[in-house]
Image (cartoon, rainbow, N blue to C red):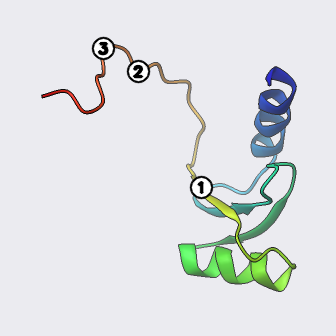
């Protein structure tokens, strides 16, 4: 799993910023990008990927640690 994480980190390091990115299911290639989610998905579909993983690429990638969060806590 660490190899895939390193690969994704490397992929995103060289990616466009401040836009939506569409990735292949195995997260090895960027197949679309756009100012809107719809534009990124449309470009991915034009590149032969019908169901891409879509993420927001911020202006700057930062490390974040989430601690003390309980999902579904009452």
The x, y position of residue 18, in whole percent, is 58, 58
Question: Which mark is nearer the camera, 3 or 1?
Answer: 3
Relative vertical location of residue 43 with respect to residue 7 in this rendering, above or below: below
Residue found at the far left of this picture: 74
- Find the distance from the CA under tag 2 to the CA under tag 3: 7 Å
The x, y position of residue 7, in whole percent, is 86, 35
Q: Earlier in the sequence, mark 2 or mark 1?
A: 1
Relative vertical location of residue 66 with respect to residue 12 in this rendering, above or below: above
- Find the distance from the CA under tag 2 to the CA under tag 1: 19 Å
Residue 59 lies left or right of residue 10; in this view the side is: left
Secondary structure at numbered mark 3: loop
According to the image, label 3 marks what residue?
68
The residue nearer to you, when weighing 51 against 18, is 51
Q: Are marks 3 and 1 in contact (CB under 8 Å)?
A: no
Q: Across the whole image, how many numbered discs are drawn on residues?
A: 3
The part of the image, by quadrant, that contains residue 48 is: bottom right
The x, y position of residue 50, in whole percent, is 75, 77
Relative vertical location of residue 63 with respect to residue 34 in this rendering, above or below: above
Q: Are marks 2 and 1 in contact (CB under 8 Å)?
A: no
According to the image, label 1 marks what residue?
55
Residue 64: assigned label: none
* Residue drawn at x 86%, y 55% as measured from the top left: 29
Q: Are marks 2 and 3 in contact (CB under 8 Å)?
A: yes
* Residue drawn at x 28%, y 23% as measured from the top left: 70
Which class describes the residues within 10 Å of circle 3: few (<14), some (14-19), or many (20+)?
A: few
Q: Quadrant of the C terminus?
A: top left
The residue nearer to you, when weighing 64 against 16, is 64
Secondary structure at numbered mark 1: strand
The part of the image, by quadrant, that contains residue 61 is: top right
Residue 66: assigned label: 2
The x, y position of residue 68, in whole percent, is 30, 14
* Residue drawn at x 49%, y 24% as measured from the top left: 64
């Amino acid at each position: 799993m660490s190899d895939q994480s390193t690969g994704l980190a490397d992929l995103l390091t060289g990616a466009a910023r401040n836009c939506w990115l569409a990735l292949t299911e195995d997260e090895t290639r960027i197949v679309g990008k756009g100012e809107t989610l719809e534009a990124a998905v449309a470009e991915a579909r034009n590149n032969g990927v019908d169901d891409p993983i879509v993420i927001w690429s911020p202006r700057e990638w930062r490390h974040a640690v989430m601690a003390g969060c309980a999902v579904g806590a009452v």
